[in-house]
Image (spheres, helix red, strand yellow):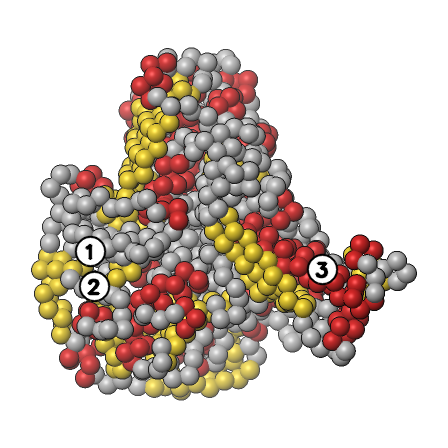
Amino acid sequence: MELAEIGKTFRRLDYQTKVTGKAHYLADMSVPGMCHGKILRSPYPHARITRIDASKALKLPGVMAVLTRDDILHNQGIEPYYGPVFKDQTIVAVEKVRHVGDPVAAVAALTIDAAEEALRGIEVEYEELPTVLDVKQALRPGSTLVHDSVKLPASGFADLAEIKPVEGTNVCTHFKLDRGDIEKGFAEADQIFDDTFTLPATQHCFLETHACIASFEPGGRITVWATTQNPFVVRTQLANIFKVPVAKVRVIVPYLGGGYGGKVYPKIEPITVALAQKAGRPVRVVLSREEVFYTITKHAAVIRMKTGVTKDGTLVARECEIHLDTGAYAEIGPRVAKKSGYTAAGPYRIPNLKIDSYSVYTNKPPAGAFRGFGVSQSAWAVESQMDIIAAALKMDPLELRKKNGYDEGDKFVTDETLRAVGLKECLDEVAKSIGWDSNKFKGSNVQGSRGDNIRRGKGLACMIKATITPSVSCAIVKLNEDASLSIYAGTVEMGQGSETVLAQIAGKELAIPLAKIQVLGVDTDVVPYDLTTSSSRSTFHMGKAVQLAAQDILRQLKRIVAQEYNVPEEKISFADGKIRLPETALDYAEVMFKRFGMQGGTLVGEGQVKTATKDEFGEKSTSAFWFLAAGAAEVEVDTDTGKFKLIKYAAAVDVGKALNPLGCRQQLNGAAITGIGQALFEEIAYDNGQLINPNLVDYVLPSLGDMPAVIDPICVEVPDRNGPFGAKGIGESALIPVAPAIANAIYDAVGVRIKDLPIKAEKIYFELEQKL
Amino acid sequence: MKRTISLKVNGVERRAEVEARTTLLDLVREQFGLTGAKLGCDIQVCGACTLLIDGKPVSACSFLAVDADGCEILTVEGLSTKDRLHPLQEAFMEFGALQCGYCTSGFLLSAKALLGECPQPSEQQIRQYLAGNFCRCGCYQEIVQAIKNVASGVRSQE
């Protein structure tokens, strides 16, 4: 059996079950006595509910329960308000609906057909209210309020403690960052650039829609099978809503069919549990594709960026206003706004900053976490403007970035020291990959051309991102009597390959082959606490926790051998899965047998990782490690039509250490492809608050037909001191530079600057027309 | 009104009672317990529900079960034998052509249909043929590599 290794590609542990169609995802599962739940949703973006009558629905055959506001308002067992940051959500609408698709009522019935029929039997009367449908309208003085007031939780996330809604306005949160002297900074500048960039709302479009099975046993035991990336957060929220201790709530997570941030924080779990409670039976809810669009989106943004630069290309001042459309509920928008604000300076040293980042309530479906978390918004502005600056100064955009870009030991905007910074290595790698020619910027800006109407161009972009800090990951590793290993970790396998990497780490520490390691499925009754599978944090945090747990096993083995064989601990060492003594070598199973006197027993190793607002040097820490990445695009643009083709894309990410190299390249390719979709065509379209494309025909996803001939994933390795074997998180990094890299390439090709995503041919065409 | 249909599923003769409006996807998932095919979009664009009917790929979410009467159906569960995976399955694992796995059964079956029609497709043909299957995790490049590998004949065929 092949021993686990680090830095070597291993076939993923989840593959065999997945390629044979035997992996069970939530919608494939059922439990005894289960009935089916369906949700009645608001047809209006903003309306008061004047009457709900469920009596007709209740009489229909097969209907087990109908849930309306009466059930959650007049129920001692339910706290009606919840939400990850602010308590502004309710299980079903209480007083008014705030977006199209807002849940109004829910039905549990013996069949899906009966549940659907019952939805039609619920009578609801609405009184339509004025709406706020974009950020500009929402911020107008005297505009309609989405929330008259917002309830705050008793305690919440440490990194968001100071953030509050601005009462009497639609401002959900306002994050401010001031550094240096902004007036002085602009006074020092030779040139000032002032540009506004926009991005539309998009949707995660994981192929597996949100689904949940819930059972509520008498006595308050709640069991939930959930499509969630953070089972422990869902557990906490359910415990608060249903007023039970967390120990009474069990959250089980099967393999997820994709997450990308769209499955963090409670989604349909509260409504499914409430239905199960009322129906007195387990209930399964599986959302339709359309409903997913009503459940969570990525923040649309308007970003105004004013930057002062000296003649030699030094960035000296930046004023930036970011407005993120957070939709009808705060969800995790406050943190998205904070992260956008923190990265509005990009990966650059800018001494004078004035950054204001807002999340703003509107009457649209809630926006939350999306791979890239606020940074894909800010980087669109930062990295597009870098090329605007480079063009104005007649500088090589690569040189401009390297001149201002972060180096090891630089201070981040928070004044903390940046460590393990592979930014410039990433930039150099992508430049090399697409054949970047720095020379051409020194003379006239000659565009590469092929034929009269086809122009070639190249562009690049880079980024810095933080991971959620503080956070906690705990792991347990059990050495079984046959020297096989069981890993108990709360990390959700959603396609990122976490099972395999965790097994590699434990296997490497203990020199045990992967074939003898089982990573358990996620069940909050069984695995210890983990904050979340998001923020590209699992390899770093859970990987480290598993490594510590494995080392704990080694320590125990050493102690046992010292006792049982009467050898001083310092004379015991480990090599190749054996315990070496001066005279002999023992294998783990032998030691287990000696310890327990039979082939039985278990050794339990424990590992805990917690990150704090201060690092081990006592310095401020807003991120346990830093993500650095760059991307470069080569495009061909047809000057007659504005149509363009992505020829090649290169994505370089500082991965710290590539534990499973193929797994890393998959993450880079996948994130780049998601970025390509957002750059080229993804956009949720609204008409008066109605989503007009909540389906996969009208909302276009990138397919193989849209792919460039080559995507070049490049792993740069600048090890992090605290990551397992130096590894950092990599899930989001490669997505972020894509859109600006492509926009910059288009500018390079035809001199057209696109400031509003997605980059569509007609936008280029109209700009080209104007230039004629 | 229920109708009785008979069809061959993964080589086994089956009979089923279905409503006229029952989809083939519901039939295989709910009556036959073959859950490898997934519902993704419900409007035959994402490819997650792809099954082969007489060797040709169809979106089972939008194909009526009654129309499969008398046909031969292949699902991902029928791709491998008890002790041997299909070369496409082997290649998908080796090249990392999947992440979350939700689209995988659809891709495997579409790829099988492609290789049935055209045993040595060009890269362009692979890209065009599979443009109707979405992989949201973004394994497209790896999927193309895996299919090219199988087409090159380095793996022994079934």
Task: Give the chain of mark 1.
Answer: A
Any mark on residue A533, and which? none
Task: Give the chain of mark 3.
Answer: A
**Mark 2 belongs to which amino acid?**
Ala
Which callout, 2 or 3, points at the residue further toward the start of the chain? Answer: 2
> x, y (%) of residue A167?
19, 45
Q: Within 10 angstroms of label 1, few (less than 14), some, or many (20 or more) residues?
A: many
Q: Which residue is mark 2?
A: A93
Q: Residue at x 15, y 62 (%)?
A: A95
Q: Residue at x 9, y 60 (%)?
A: A127
Any mark on residue A554, and which? 3
> x, y (%) of residue A325?
27, 44
Secondary structure found at label 2: loop
> x, y (%) of residue A664?
59, 48
Which callout, 1 or 3, points at the residue further toward the start of the chain? Answer: 1
Q: Within 10 angstroms of label 3, few (less than 14), some, or many (20 or more) residues?
A: many
> x, y (%) of residue A561?
79, 65
Q: Which residue is mark 1?
A: A98
Disc 2 to disc 3, how far (Cα)? 54 Å
Asked whether, in this view, residue A569 is left or right of residue A682, the answer is right
Q: Residue at x 13, y 43 (%)?
A: A143
**Mark 1 belongs to which amino acid?**
Arg
Q: Are marks 2 and 3 in contact (CB under 8 Å)?
A: no
